[in-house]
Image: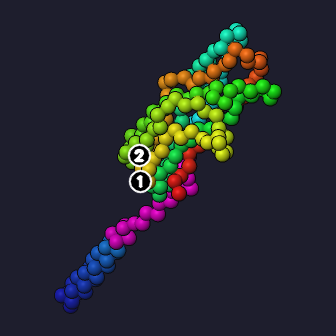
Amino acid sequence: MKGRKHITRFTIVMVMAVLAVGVFAGAALAAAGDADLTGTAAPAVTGWTPGTFSATLTGAAAVLESTNFSGFTVTDATGEGKGWIVTVAAGQFSDGTHSLAKTALSMPAYSVSGNAGSTTAPTPSITAGAWAVVSDGTEGNPTVELAHANAGEGMGIYTFSTLSPWKLSIPTNVYEGDYNSAITVTVAQHI
């Protein structure tokens, strides 16, 4: 009888060991996961702040400089790799009654760098500058292309910066006033 109890216990221990191996094997198989990655709808521009110009009229023509225009960041988290284009547009400076020349505003060249570990190579192409920037994106007033990333490029985060000033040309016959212009930086995904 003693031998039989011993065998029964052995059998129970074996069954428990087999069940334990089956449970752990199932857990190991369940560890193989699924990654559902969803991108954003479109690339985005952040951090852009237009600068200001200020001067006292002297009767002479002048070129005002402003270094307080900010750099900006382009983030392409779409996960599609279609590429994108960055454009700049500015309306004609006006005080509501008088306007500066359409070519009064000029933008310096910008440089671009990818944030470490967050981009795909190569770096997007920069269009050589400086440019006269007056446009509203309509026929005859096209936007200025600042940079573009071809298909398969531009995924990740890119920082655009300049050390040179934006310039505003003031003629000798300018009227005193508060002149304004809407200056926008836009990024659009290639279709």
Front one among 95 and 152: 95
Magenta highlight on residue 45? yes
Q: Residue at x 70, y 8 (%)?
A: 58
Q: Residue flagged by tag 2: what amino acid is it?
A: Thr
Q: Quadrant of residue 125?
A: top left
Q: Residues within 10 Å of mark 2 (few under 14, many from 20)?
A: some
Q: Residue at x 63, y 21 (%)?
A: 169
Where residue 65 sits in the image (x, y, percent)? 59, 19
Q: Is residue 52 above or below residue 122?
A: above
Extreme-right residue of the structure: 97
Q: Residue at x 52, y 38 (%)?
A: 146
Residue 35: tell me if it is visible: yes
| Left or right of 2 on screen, residue 49 | right
Query: Which mark sits nearer the N-terminus, 2 or 1?
Result: 2
Q: Split into 4 quadrants, where in the image is the N terminus? A: bottom left
Q: Which residue is mark 1?
A: 152
Q: Secondary structure at mark 2?
A: strand
- Is most of the magenta stretch helix, strand or loop? loop
Residue 79: tell me if it is visible: no
Q: Is residue 39 above or below residue 145?
A: below
| Left or right of 124 on screen, residue 165 | right
Q: Residue flagged by tag 1: what amino acid is it?
A: Gly
Residues drawn in magenta: 27-46
Q: Residue at x 76, y 22 (%)?
A: 178
Q: Which residue is mark 2?
A: 119
